[in-house]
């Protein structure tokens, strides 16, 4: 007992001495650490830098790396924009920060714990004065003067003077009714003189309408216009896409992004017969076009203006075909003056707003297992479709996203070159353009070539002759896939890339050869995209020659006779090659055979065939349109009269020829005479369709002192589609405006 007590006492004494010793050692170490930290902190407060063309953000990073200073600032501060050269040795933080933030618009504050806050410097305001006048030097009263980006502003007094407090390096915006808005940087100016240019009077603008023109202020119909200058530089594959959002009441929709795909144009959302609406009538330089194709073939730089006739009164001169609205296009012509060359070249890359997201291979396997468990909770693990643990582990690190693999960022390239000019009695306009766009996949592209030559000559004081020739060639190429039914969206092909799943690669390389995997699906999107199933090629070639002769009758003021003749020729060639292809079955691994291996079982190779054929279609369309006009325009005192009478004759002939053969030997031997020689594998068809119409149309305008307006129009037209007793129909319209009643 005594021995035990003695041991306990000795243990307590030893423990106390040991604890005291440990405490002394800890204190010494803490003291050394504090001294060292103090020395280190002191040494890190001086800065050495030698940087060239560095941003403020880069300099701050260097300071943080060699000192204990830490910086805080808002992400909105654009510290990466300015480029600075700095060279300092053992400089203080204040010296460095003042150097790099000088004239930057930012300030800094050194806080406790070596924290440096960077923020936007407070703006310094000062008083400026100024005067606002027009180009004639007349003072503009009540003009608005605003600081851009701020809520402060003022207006000019009766003498056009103003005074305003503005921040340093600000911009003032000056505007007045009837004048163009002007932005002026203040800089170091204390007194500003602003001269505003008058806005072009839109009410006096000449608007092209059916078979003539009118002044905007006298328009009684619903007509919207587009100036071609607003869309000339937009790099699109067709003209219809450039109109989106630029014409009130005009609905432009595009179902897909494939280059060359025409937008759907509707002036009215629907009509009484078709709920989705019908396309409008297209008229180019007075020539009625058979469809939208000729409109989309135009390049924006060869267009002068576009008018959209939206109501019945405006479109009545085109009869029943104008019931869905009319789009009237006038192409450019030369102007008197020296030759002017205009070159526009652009290159663009398109990015998808959003691409569909699909389950990874692992997530898909988990989902399948969950579904099996829900449907068969007792023995779902014994099912062949169940994914075992080793397979789940494999798919955690093995995943093949075919959409990411095949999806490309579409690119488009466009170049246009115009030459225009003229002398006293002749003017000319020459234009050429080229466009190329690629699609979201390989082997999808569209090309368009345009050329136009327009010459106008004044033979005598009363006789003018003009010649307008244009041509365009469009080429469209895409892979052949039977189940997209020639749709430009290729929706079924997209769907195949999404629904194939991500549990196996599309191709597996064996002995240097890539073999398409056929384990998961009985068709292969990759073979379609790569062009191994064939192609769908189209080529459109359009030519038109338009001549015009105009004679001003010298002995009757305001009377003119005019005739136009246009010959239009369109050739369409379409070639479709549809070829079968092999799919290969590979060995399977895993407890449930869900993992595709790298060994081919050639005995299970199978052919995917959606046909083996070559088809060619030729369409030739030839038409002419002849118009004869009697035009009268004159003013008698306060009375103004404008009248137009038109005779129009049109004939059209369309020839179709198609041929096909089965059993094409290979993709390279894509000629009809190299396919099957069996007569049962041949196919030939063709037909011819003739059309024609005869019409008389007229317009009458009357204006009394700009207060009373009357406008009427009509069309009397015959079509071969109706029996002789009901072949002709009359389409009139009348519009009246009374200034007193409207006011």
Image: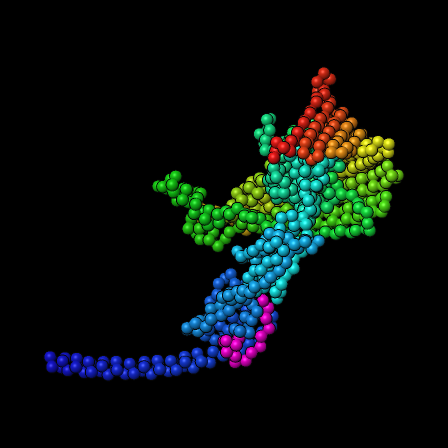
Q: Can you tell which quarter of the image residue 193 is in?
A: bottom right
Figure quadrant of the N terminus: bottom left
Magenta residues, start to end: 80-96
Q: Which residue reaches farthest front?
A: 158
Residue drawn at (60%, 55%) of the image: 156
Residue 489 in view of the camera: no
State left or right for residue 278 relative to residue 388. right
Q: Is residue 103 above or below residue 522?
A: below
Nearer-the-camera pick, 91 or 636: 636
In percent of width and height, residue 693 lies at: 75, 25
Residue 332 in view of the camera: yes
In percent of width and height, residue 281 lies at: 68, 32
Asked if the magenta segment contains residue 126, the reply would be no
Nearer-the-camera pick, 331 or 66: 331
Q: Which residue reaches farthest right?
A: 460
State left or right for residue 297 relative to residue 395. right
Residue drawn at (44%, 80%) of the image: 42
Figure quadrant of the C terminus: top right
Residue drawn at (47%, 78%) of the image: 45
Q: Which residue reaches farthest top?
A: 725
Nearer-the-camera pick, 206 or 625: 206
State left or right for residue 435 relative to residue 374. right
């Amino acid at each position: 007992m005594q021995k035990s007590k003695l041991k306990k006492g000795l243990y307590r004494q030893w423990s106390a001495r040991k604890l005291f010793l440990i405490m002394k050692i800890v204190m010494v170490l803490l003291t050394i650490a504090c001294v060292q930290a103090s020395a280190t902190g002191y040494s890190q407060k001086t800065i050495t830098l030698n940087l060239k063309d560095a941003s403020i953000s880069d300099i701050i990073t260097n300071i943080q790396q060699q000192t204990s200073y830490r910086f805080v600032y808002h992400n909105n501060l654009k510290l990466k924009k300015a480029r600075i050269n700095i060279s300092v040795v053992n400089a203080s933080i204040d010296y460095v920060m003042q150097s790099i933030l000088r004239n930057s618009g930012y300030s800094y504050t050194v806080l406790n714990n070596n924290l440096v806050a960077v923020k936007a410097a407070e703006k310094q305001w000062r008083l400026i004065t100024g005067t606002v006048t027009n180009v004639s030097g007349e003072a503009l009263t009540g003009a608005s003067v605003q600081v851009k980006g701020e809520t402060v502003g003022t207006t000019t007094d009766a003498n056009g003077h103003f005074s305003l407090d503005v921040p340093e390096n600000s911009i003032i915006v000056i505007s007045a009714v009837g004048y163009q808005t002007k932005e002026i940087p203040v800089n170091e100016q204390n007194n500003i003189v602003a001269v505003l240019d008058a806005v072009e009077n839109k009410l006096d603008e000449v608007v092209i309408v059916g078979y003539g023109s009118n002044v905007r202020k006298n328009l009684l119909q619903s007509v919207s216009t587009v100036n071609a200058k607003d869309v000339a530089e937009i790099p699109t594959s067709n003209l219809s896409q450039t109109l989106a959002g630029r014409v009130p009441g005009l609905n432009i929709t595009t179902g897909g992004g494939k280059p060359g795909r025409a937008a759907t144009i509707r002036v009215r959302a629907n009509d009484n017969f078709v709920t989705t609406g019908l396309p409008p009538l297209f008229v180019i330089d007075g020539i009625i076009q058979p469809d939208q194709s000729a409109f989309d073939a135009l390049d924006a730089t060869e267009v002068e203006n576009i008018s959209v006739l939206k109501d019945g009164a405006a479109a009545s001169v085109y009869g029943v075909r104008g019931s869905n609205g009319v789009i009237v296009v006038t192409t450019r012509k030369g102007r008197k003056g020296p030759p002017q060359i205009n070159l526009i070249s652009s290159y663009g890359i398109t990015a998808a707003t959003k691409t569909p997201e699909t389950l990874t291979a692992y997530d898909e396997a988990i989902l399948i297992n969950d579904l099996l468990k829900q449907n068969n909770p007792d023995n779902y693990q014994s099912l062949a479709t169940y994914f075992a643990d080793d397979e789940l582990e494999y798919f955690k690190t093995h995943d093949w996203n075919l959409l990411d693999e095949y999806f490309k960022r579409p690119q488009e390239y466009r170049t246009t070159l115009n030459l225009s000019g003229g002398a006293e009695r002749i003017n000319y306009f020459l234009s050429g353009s080229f466009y190329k766009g690629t699609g979201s996949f390989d082997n999808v592209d569209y090309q368009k070539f345009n050329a136009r030559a327009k010459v106008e000559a004044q033979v005598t004081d009363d006789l003018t002759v003009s010649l307008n020739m244009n041509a365009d060639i469009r080429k469209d190429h895409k892979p052949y896939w039977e189940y997209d039914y020639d749709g430009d969206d290729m929706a079924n092909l997209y769907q195949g890339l999404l629904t194939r799943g991500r549990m196996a690669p599309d191709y597996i390389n064996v002995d240097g050869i890539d073999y398409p995997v056929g384990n998961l699906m009985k068709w292969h999107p990759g073979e379609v995209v790569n062009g191994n199933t064939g192609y769908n090629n189209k080529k459109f070639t359009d030519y038109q020659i338009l001549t015009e002769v105009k004679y001003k009758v010298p002995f009757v003021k305001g009377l003119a006779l005019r005739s136009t003749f246009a010959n239009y020729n369109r050739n369409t060639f379409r070639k479709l090659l549809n070829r079968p292809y092999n799919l290969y079955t590979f060995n399977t691994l895993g407890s449930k055979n869900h993992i595709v291996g790298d060994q081919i079982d050639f005995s299970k190779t199978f052919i995917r065939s959606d046909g083996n054929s070559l088809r060619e279609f030729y369409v030739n369309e030839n038409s002419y349109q002849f118009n004869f006009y009697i035009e009268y325009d004159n003013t008698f005192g306060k009375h103004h009269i404008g009248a137009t009478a038109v005779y129009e004759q049109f004939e059209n002939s369309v020839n179709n020829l198609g041929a096909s053969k089965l059993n094409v030997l290979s993709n390279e031997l894509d000629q009809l005479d190299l396919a099957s020689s069996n007569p049962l594998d041949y196919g030939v068809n063709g037909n011819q369709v003739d059309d024609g119409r005869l019409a008389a149309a007229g317009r009458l305008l009357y204006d009394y002192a700009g207060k009373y307006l009357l406008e009427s129009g009509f069309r009397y037209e015959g079509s071969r589609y109706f029996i002789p007793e009901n072949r002709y129909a009359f389409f009139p319209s009348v519009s009246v405006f009374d200034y007193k009643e409207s006011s």
